[in-house]
Amino acid sequence: YQLGFKLVSLNVSDIYAMGGSPLQVLLALALPPETDTGFLDMFMDGVRNALDLYGASLAGGDLSGSTDAMTLTATVIGQAAKPVLRSGARAGDGLYVTGPLGDSACGLELLKKIGRPVDLHAKSVRGPLPWKTMKPLIERHVLPVARRPGAWLKSARAMIDISDGLALDLKRLCIESGVGALVDMESLPVSAAMRKAAPVLGLDPLELALSGGEDYELLFAGRGTVRGRAIRIGEIVKGKEIRMNCPDGKKMPLEPKGYMHFNLNKGGG
């Protein structure tokens, strides 16, 4: 179920990141002969629930056999009256995100620590923290909900979804726009649950917020009055440097760490 829901959500996020609306989804499944039909039924339940949530329909796709690994692929078709690209940011624009960062990566680390499948409907799950703290973090990882553009969309000049980590995805937006950025460390939104869980796992909340990935929040550059639910975390500046303003007033380079899809030597970010 979770795989089906997440597969649709992460692709819908790409449509939302251009200010669009999802319309149709194409699924391509390559399944080994031993695939359990119960798994497939649950997978499709997740797909259907995600389609209902986003107001999209399943238009078709492809089903084939595989002699090796299972492959699950989704393509989302959407539309936008005026697409928001990554290339529209200009010096002086504010830099905004639409929600807390690092929850999903923290949820993944919790799952590794627990070491077994987790029932999100359970009243309690044994782990390193109380279930009421762990559950929202794990849920952000296994059942992410793509962030639908809000009232602030009219102010967005450039936008990208945060799938590979804030630092890395900000770098991509800045490269496309030919600008730099200054991020305010103290303005980064971090949930209370993540702030509590990270130290228990031996992790730095700031590092998770900057490079954890799979948040599926939207990062955008906006000018003028930005309405709706969005948190200002910095500004776009001239040049190509991306730096972070620290609480002590110093400005340090923001290293673009995150998930690298084709980093074959290191197996990811």
Image (cartoon, rainbow, N blue to C red):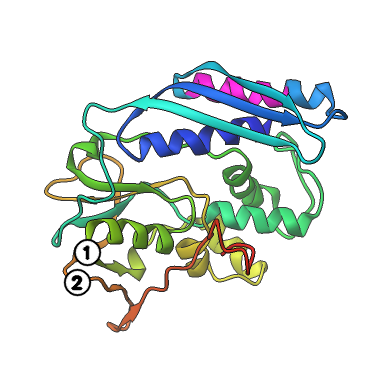
Residue 161 versus residue 194: which sits nearer the camera?
Answer: 161
Q: Quadrant of residue 38?
A: top right
Q: Quadrant of the C terminus?
A: bottom right
For the residues labelled 1 and 2, say whether their Cβ atoms are less than 8 Å apart: yes
x, y percentage for residue 209?
47, 62
Q: How many marks?
A: 2
Task: Tell me if residue 199 is in the magenta stretch.
Answer: no
Where residue 30 sits, quadrant-wise, is: top right
Q: Residue at x 32, y 35 (%)?
A: 149
Residue 140 seen from this side: yes
Mark sitting on residue 79? none
User: Magenta part of the protein: which range?
Assistant: 42-53
Q: Which residue is mark 2?
A: 239
Camera-side residue of 127 and 24 = 24
Identity, as a three-letter code, of the amino acid under mark 2: Gly
In the picture, the disc for residue 179 is 1
Residue at 16% from the left image edge and 69% from the top image edge = 238
The image quadrant of residue 41 is top right
Quadrant placement of the N terminus: top right
